[in-house]
Amino acid sequence: MAGSIKDRVAIIGMGCTKFGERWDTSASDLMVEAFKECIEDARIEKKDIEAAWSGTCFQESGFSAMPLGQALKLPFLPVTRVENFCATGSEALRGASYAVASGVYDIALAVGVEKLKDWGYGGLPGMIDQAIAGQRFGTGVTPYQSAPGLFAMMATRYFAKYGISPEEGKKIIGMVSVKSHHNGTLNPKAHLQREVTIDQVMKAPIIAWPLGLFDCCGVSDGGAAAIVVRADMAKKFRPDPVYIKALQIAVSSGEESIYTDYDYAHVETGYRAGMRAFQEAGVKNPREEISMAELHDCFSITETVSYEDLGFSSRGKAKDDILAGRFNLDGEQPVQPDGGLKCFGHPIGASGLRMMYEMYKQLQGKAGPRQIKNPKMGLTHNMGGYPAGNVISVLIVGL
Amino acid sequence: VANYDEDALTMAVASAMNCLEGFDRGKVDALYFATTTAPYAERQNAGMIATALDLRADIQTADFTGSTKAGTTALLSAYNAVGAGSAKSVLVCTSDCRLGKPGSSQEMICGDGAAAFLLGDDGVAASLGGSYSVSYDFADHQRVGDDKYDRSWEDRWIRDAGYSKFIPEAVSGLLKKCNLSPKDIAKVCYPCLYARDHANMGRKLGFDPAQIQDHMLTAVGYTGTPNALMMLAAALEDAKPGDRILAASYGNGSDAIFFQVTDEIERAKNKRGIKEYLSSKKPLSNYEKYLHFRDMIPVEESPRTELSPTWISTQWREHKWIVGFVGSRCKRCGTPQYPGQRVCVKPDCGAIDEMEDYRFSDKKGRLFTYTGDNLGTCPDLPGVYGMVDFEGGGRALLDVTDCNLDELKVDMPVEMSFRRKYYDKQRGVYSYWWKAVPLKQ
């Protein structure tokens, strides 16, 4: 890479709605709610914003860039709608950041929002079919795959690859959810704020074998927003801006789903995006240098393999770190301090910016009862699609 | 009964795949499909079977239907085509998935089945020696327009005025025409609608009980169009060179045909056949599930899995990979890939537009990973699917059928089976695709 985004852009304001089943709010309401907090936090006025990026994944939430422009009454600004599955919110931030880094704009807005609870059922609308590389659109004949099922296949293979019995495996990934449920109780904006025991997790109804109810994240409504500015002007707005160190995405090439090298026990794009992000941020040892992270725990198995993809744990060894409590809030490398997708919830287009909101607050020392001691660098990781065909974003921020 | 994802068309493909093992499919010149329960009233079912089998496009295809004797009629037509020299080899598929109204005697006696025969003039395992047909407009049952179920007249009348008359007339007509007597026949095959009368009919015709082929009424049921030919297939499995086997159908008359078994029979026995298919059955103990399988009761369906509209033009554009299960193989690096690609998927190859067709339907594979999904629409939850790695290369995400989740293991061997994927009621489209079936280990 010839260039790097490192320390060229800073976040000076963020907002995030309460996530959950927001029966009384529309997508527009969620945009306004996140924007209002964001702009107050940034201490700027709407007229200072020069361009905006709007992230929504499902078309019911978004109709080009107009819903954002019209909800916020942005004064004829250049607004771009982006969509990249669950990395949509991170993609919005990436667009705004590159625009500022290019020198064309000084101040840009990124908003991610999703209104999932108007579908009439739990889970996501059936669009996963389209994520499968090489298996073409609109034929309707491929297996009906729920998101839990697609990720359950990774648990099946992960357990087989490392010689873990289903019972033992369910316990290991179950501990991941127990940890996130605890963190969720400390977060008033989280969708789910209740402790669960490993026994409850293990005995919960099976959604897609071997994943049970508590292996799956919440399906929520929510929105989040960020204001980014040129790094050299950031301190004019506030004393504690958060600097962007890396913005990377990786998209499946199709080989995972139709070529036979992929082991279905890791996520190749996660590894690739992570390596690029570490290079961009100058991180040599992610296990030691990344203070905290929000990983894409759509399912407990996803978080488990992501520890390994990102070098927090070595291959096949996530088990040891999980059982040792390394990723707990009081552990050496806290992950999902805000409860994660598991408990904060997962409105698709908002999730990337929600993760960034937690890293931002933690770095500023404003995370209340969840505050991690003296964090230096935080990482966010989104994964959209399924293990053999997906888009991954890895973003790193720091002081 | 057939599984929820099977119908007359898929079973015809299964029997044809079994029949064609060891033959060059490129040499099949015609395909005749005989059934009374075709999924499509208009849109040729034989054409879809030919595509599923990856046969050539420059062949004759035809549906034979309207009577349960259509199977033997299709076979005779194929014989005539070969005899006349208009085709070197003709594939005849017969199949039925006959639906009995809940509580009816049809529900009690009907079973689902299929049989396929390849007719040709080279390497013949059983030589067709002659035939005798009778045709009567005998309305023992009929179905019109939108009828879902047959309407039948009184059984005693069917038995006395039709069943017990037409088959004997065709069989004795054939024996007389070919100058044979019952003792010249090793096995005689004819459908069983009524067990006692089946036995009586054979005795009256002069056959010993040992000469009468097992009718499978208790093991499978009365299968309609393929019935006589399934019995013929079973008889051939046990036949010796020199045996004469006679098969007669029933339905608006009867066709009786006799075959002389040749030395080639041993080669043809190397198939799955009736015995192996019967041994692969699984108990279905829940009647409500059966009613759901056949769409006879309304059930709650998850809105999560509502179908998007079927795009007919897309299905046509992609018919080779959907129906034919044909992918591509890179001519530069040899990597098979499904569905067919234009840019080679092997990371260090990168060839563009250097592909050739590659058939996956006859390749075995292993179940690389799997799940059982409780959120789907599958009438037999959990919906089981997984990643299949094919022998020789290639990988696909496929439904896994004819199995229970707890029997599955990572890396177990599977084979491909053509199955009904969905019925788009609003648009009148049946869609089909291939699924993986675990192989016995």
Image (spheres, helix red, strand yellow):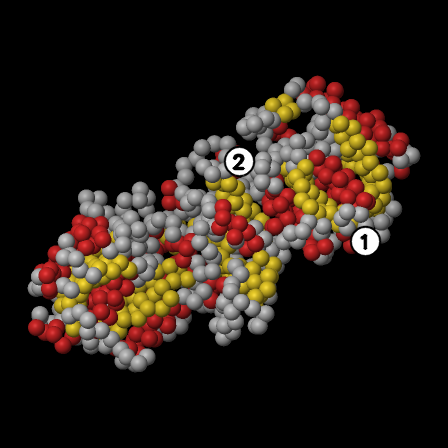
Chain designation of label 1:
B
Q: Quadrant of residue B112?
A: top right
Tell me the distance, in whole angstroms, between the alpha carbons under discs 2 and 1: 41 Å
Residue B350 place in picture, x, y as percent: 50, 72
- Residue A154 in the image, given as x and y percentages of width and height: 42, 61
* Residue sitting nearer the eye, A55 or A196: A55
The residue identified by callout 2 is B294
Mark sitting on residue B244: none
- Front residue of A178 and B239: B239
In depth, the one of A399 and A164 nearer the eye is: A399
The amino acid sitting under disc 1 is: Gly
SS at badge 1? loop
The residue located at (49%, 50%) in the rendering is B314
Q: Position of residue A110 (x, y in %)?
A: 21, 62
State the SS at label 2: loop
Numbered tag placed on residue B123 in the rendering: 1
How dense is the environment of label 2, judged by Cα within 10 Å: few (below 14), some, or many (20 and up)? some
In the figure, B189 relative to B29: above or below?
A: above
Q: Is residue B236 left or right of residue A168?
A: right
Locate the N terminus of chain A by quadrant.
bottom left
Residue shown at 54% from the left, 44% from the top? B420
The lab-note entry on whether marks 2 and 1 share a chain reads yes
